[in-house]
Amino acid sequence: MSLPTAELNVLQQARLLTHKTPFFYTSKDVLRQNYETFTHLFDDVEVCYALKANSDPKVLTYLDSLGCSFEAASAYEVQILLDLGVEPARIVYGTSIKPAEQIKLAFDAGVKRYAADSREEIKKIADNAPGSKVFVRAIVEDAGSVFMMSERFGAPVDTVKDLVLYARHLDLKTYGISFYVGSQAAHANMWAKGVQAVKPIIEELHAEGVTLEILNIGGGFPVHYDTQEDIPELRQIVIDVHNALHGLPYMPKLLMEPGRGLVATSTVLVTEVIARNDRANKPWLCLDAGIYNALYEAMIHQGATRYPIHPFNPPTEPTENLSFTIAGPTGDSLDVVARDVSLPAYTDVGDVLIFEHTGAYTVTMASRFNGFPAPPLYIG
Ligand SMILES: Cc1ncc(COP(=O)(O)O)c(C=O)c1O
């Protein structure tokens, strides 16, 4: 498969392909541009891609070749990275609640950086990964993000200092503080507010002679799925974070854990219509990929992500459009991918549709419900 990639966007590139549907197609160009955007946001930042967003080996191998670091959520994800030859020094184990034996597995494999948000977890790390670097995850405001995490993860800000000191007490390295504003965050100032929340802790620890190596501002960077919606600009997020960092007694190295923001726009899903029918006087299209094997976040209670949808061969002349409901191939009522999608009225069985921005939380969330396998992912 050879593609004239440089000037073509991922959607145009996918149009040149003739694989059997359904399939994902990822553009290395877009991945590289996104990675470079993140690495250029701050002077000295370590970008640790959260591979829970997309752990396809081809995507990981390419990001590794660019020099990207990784945030793993389990020893299983650590193993995926090690099998691809990623240096353990470029991996952080970023989930703040971990099975003890998985900490040990990661430690034995050479991973030295761990998140924690409680004394119990810090003790677990001291027992299973002695002498490692620990960053304490603080709860910060995540209201407005599509996926909020603060109910399950993070330590109340007023306990973070004690946790850092407890890690030191157990001979762990007091590596830093992290926070996570939730996924698909809604406001540009959420990261700056996170920095403001933990700033006094950094100052107090400094006054007590404890210097932190890093400040981990997490992921959450949103993607422009729905063109009707405003999303925070990365440029504004960075300006706000810079302002918030101002006045610290010293500057810890910044670490980021983008998942969605790095991979979502790199990928399209190419699907085919397998049935068209009218239900309650409305036209429905049924596709060969759906919620369960490809588009989990489009499920009604999973954020109901609205991916931009286009016909594979756009009409060359003005044509009448209809508003369609689009469903997946399974026999389940929740397998409805999108409603009120405007497509050419003639769209019917055998026509191919492309879903944009499907690089994040798609392949990693796929199940074989009703037997339908996850679509393969091609990269070019
Ligand atoms: C600890 C941690 N870091 C990073 C991420 C990636 O988040 P996002 O895909 O929103 O950038 C997540 C997502 O759940 C997370 O839990």
Image: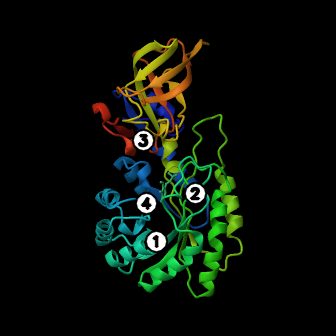
Distance between the alpha carbons at the discs numbered 1 and 4? 23 Å
The local crowd at label 1, few if under 14, some if 14 to 19, many if 20 or more residues have their Cα within 10 Å, is many
Q: Going by the picture, which residue comes out furthest to the bottom? A: 209
Of labels 2 and 3, the one closer to you: 2
Whether residue 358 is visible, yes or no, is yes
Of labels 2 and 4, the one closer to you: 2
**Quadrant hosting residue 271:** top left
Point 44% across, 25% down: residue? 327
Residue 205: give x, y in percent of width and height: 59, 82
Amino acid carrying label 3: it is: Thr
Residue 298 to residue 78: above or below: above
Q: Nearer the viewer, residue 117 or 30?
A: 117
Total marks shown come to 4
Q: Earlier in the sequence, mark 3 or mark 1?
A: 1
Q: Mark 1 points at which residue?
A: 118
* Element type at mark 3: loop
| Left or right of 152 in this view: 40 | right
Q: Mark 4 points at which residue?
A: 70
Whether residue 372 is visible, yes or no, is no
Amino acid carrying label 4: it is: Phe
Say the numbered circle drawn on residue 362.
Answer: 3
* Element type at mark 2: loop
Q: Mark 2 points at which residue?
A: 181
Of labels 1 and 2, the one closer to you: 1
Of labels 1 and 4, the one closer to you: 1
Distance between the alpha carbons at the discs numbered 3 and 4? 18 Å
Q: Earlier in the sequence, mark 2 or mark 4?
A: 4
* Element type at mark 1: loop
The N terminus, quarter of image: top left
The C terminus, quarter of image: top left
